Image (cartoon, rainbow, N blue to C red):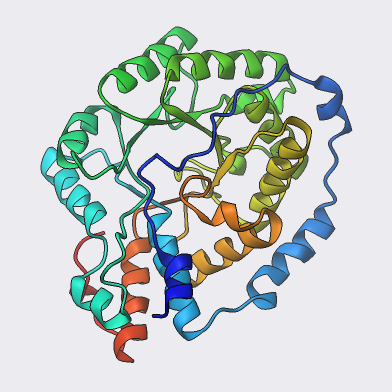
Amino acid sequence: MNSELQVIAGGGDTGADRPARNQGMPLDLSWLRDARVNRSAVERRAATLGTRRTVKKDWQAAWLLKAVSCIDLTTLSGDDTPGRVHRLCVKARRPLRQDILEALGAERLDVTVGAVCVYHNMIEPAVEALKGSGIPVAAVSAGFPAGLGPLETRIREIEVSVAAGAREIDIVIDRGLALAGDWERLYEQLRGFREACGAAHMKAILGTGDLATLRNVAKASLVAMMAGADFIKTSTGKESVNATLPVSLVMVRMIRAYLERSGQRVGFKPAGGIGEAKTALVYLGLMKEELGRDWMEPALFRFGASGLLRDIERQLEHAATGRYSAGFRQPMA
């Protein structure tokens, strides 16, 4: 892999290269009233994302290495144990087999995932397993996945997760407020969540599969960013419909509009149903075309995924050897 491609592929996110925190802004209801989405145009654009840009050979390997560094490696199961989380964190530190990296000429790259995402009770085992790696622990919070508990309880949940060592908090919005158009109340709740996060970065999960319309997705994106979200995220992974390209396109264009108006950069995290390397490449292409090169970095882009890493490692082994391996050759992802 030549040096130019290593620039594309290299570099995990230790937190040092993160942009300034999104400080938010006062709620602008006139901006929400004026928000419009042309659904047919969005769907036409989304349909071209996988066909207009293709990356092959070394370039594809470099993009897949970059995708690895943007993964929030996730386990959100009711049967999670400290042992399972420890194994996941070992994989997070060394997500790719050394022989694959050597075959690609990428053995000097410090490739790690972007974060490890867990429930609150697994924060401390994850922090301990990741000590010294620079990989942040993200915790789902604020009544995940429904977001319907008492507000005081949701805020306290955030506070105790930050105290336990979470450096990123994936909060979930009350979708009922968005569906009812109660943007003022949603904004105030999110400001409270942002304050409770303190120094931890806040990723706001919109639950887009429950929001009914792309216009609601656009408005919820804007409200979350105005309230100070450092990332906006499509889904909990628990809805019947999770990340889709039309929804993602609307959200990244709201990120661009917010940047133009406020001067503040906000990250994007598609989550749920992203399990194939070829899909990851399409999302990276979306970020590059709509927001630019900076949004191909883990500081501003993440995949919420549990199984994606396995397929990326399989595709990278093919790039290195010309052969596809059986799934059992990839350690747990």
Residue sitting at the far bottom: 322
Q: Nearer the viewer, residue 66 or 120?
A: 66
Quadrant of image for the C terminus: bottom left
Identity of the residue drawn at 85% across and 41% down? 36
Please state if 213 lies on the left or on the right of 150 as rendered. right
Q: Nearer the viewer, residue 285 or 173?
A: 285
Residue sitting at the far top: 152
Please state if 100 lies on the left or on the right of 14 as rendered. left
Please state if 24 lies on the left or on the right of 43 as rendered. left
Report if residue 276 is visible in the image. Answer: no
The x and y percentages for residue 219 are: 74, 33
Identity of the residue drawn at 72% across and 71% down? 48
**Residue 226, placed above or below residue 88:** above
Identity of the residue drawn at 42% across and 70% down? 6
The x and y percentages for residue 137 are: 31, 37
Snapshot quadrant of residue 201? top left
The x and y percentages for residue 80 are: 20, 40
Q: Nearer the viewer, residue 290 or 235?
A: 290
**Residue 172, placed above or below residue 191:** below
Please state if 173 lies on the left or on the right of 254 as rendered. left
The x and y percentages for residue 224 are: 63, 28
**Residue 118, placed above or below residue 113:** above
**Residue 174, placed above or below residue 259:** above
